[in-house]
Image: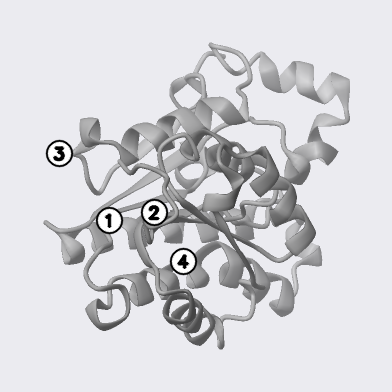
Amino acid sequence: MLNNTENDKTYVLITGASSGIGRQCAIQLSENYNLLLCARREEKLNETKALCKNPKNHLVFPVDLSDTENIENQLTSFIKENNICIEKFLHSAGTIGMMPLKMVSNDFIINCLKVNLISAELIVKVLSNKKINLGRLNSVVFISSNISNMGAKAFSVYSASKSGLDGMMKSLAMELAPKVRVNSVLPGGVETEMTQSIYADEEKIKRIEETYPLGLGSTKNIADAVEFLFSDNASWITGQQLAVDGGRCVNITG
């Protein structure tokens, strides 16, 4: 845990920080950490920064995570130019990728995998490089989904990307131990900009809510879990999928 001072050059990198879960995580984590906020839209990142505690202590890093050919060089250059180190990484960026099989295209699959999966691996690669990040990385959290271990119509591509993310998490947890802990948070039904189209149908929401023993969740529920995994209270936890979904993934009620 850090004191947010102008001389402190250690940061938490948050992708997808412009909205939804990423923004809520940024707001909560800004109480104790300096943040490097990453997303495509710079104006949205600046909105998030303004909502955080001590905005002057945080940096914005506008980048398109689907441009996986350049993400390593872009992040490396940013770290060096700003003379910073990253101690924790939260990959909250993602595209929901809801599409029936008959409409799926190669481009759709590749874009989903780039944003949800490939960019995360390449960012961890950069941050675990001692020449670039000086060995300061100590914790990584991926925002996955409870669909990683389940199934749903029209979610085959999204599900594959999240299952891949969790598989990658487990292997990285072994490869980077004991210096770096790597875990995933698997949210259930949470309303964000990305899921607004699903939540727009009140009848559908009522049906969905009935499958959640504790009801539908909020972005704060997810941010609380991330905050815990980054804390010293989770110092003996790595390689885990933490489901934060109100009991949805264990509900087999008919």
Q: Position of residue 225 (x, y in %)?
A: 42, 31
- Badge 1 crowding class, 10 Å Cα cut-off, few under 14, some 14 to 19, many 20 or more, is some
Which quarter of the figure has residue 237?
top left
Label 3 vs 1, first from the N-terminus: 1
Measure how far apart labels 1 and 2 are at the Cα level. 6 Å
Q: Amino acid at mark 2?
A: Asp
Give the residue at mark 3: 236
Q: Position of residue 39 (x, y in %)?
A: 65, 62
Residue at the (31%, 73%) spot, across then down:
133
Label 3 vs 4, first from the N-terminus: 4
Measure how far apart labels 3 and 4 are at the Cα level. 23 Å
Measure how far apart labels 1 and 4 are at the Cα level. 13 Å
Label 1 vs 4, first from the N-terminus: 4
Secondary-structure class at tag 4: helix
Q: Position of residue 246 (x, y in %)?
A: 51, 19
Secondary-structure class at tag 2: helix
Q: Amino acid at mark 1?
A: Lys
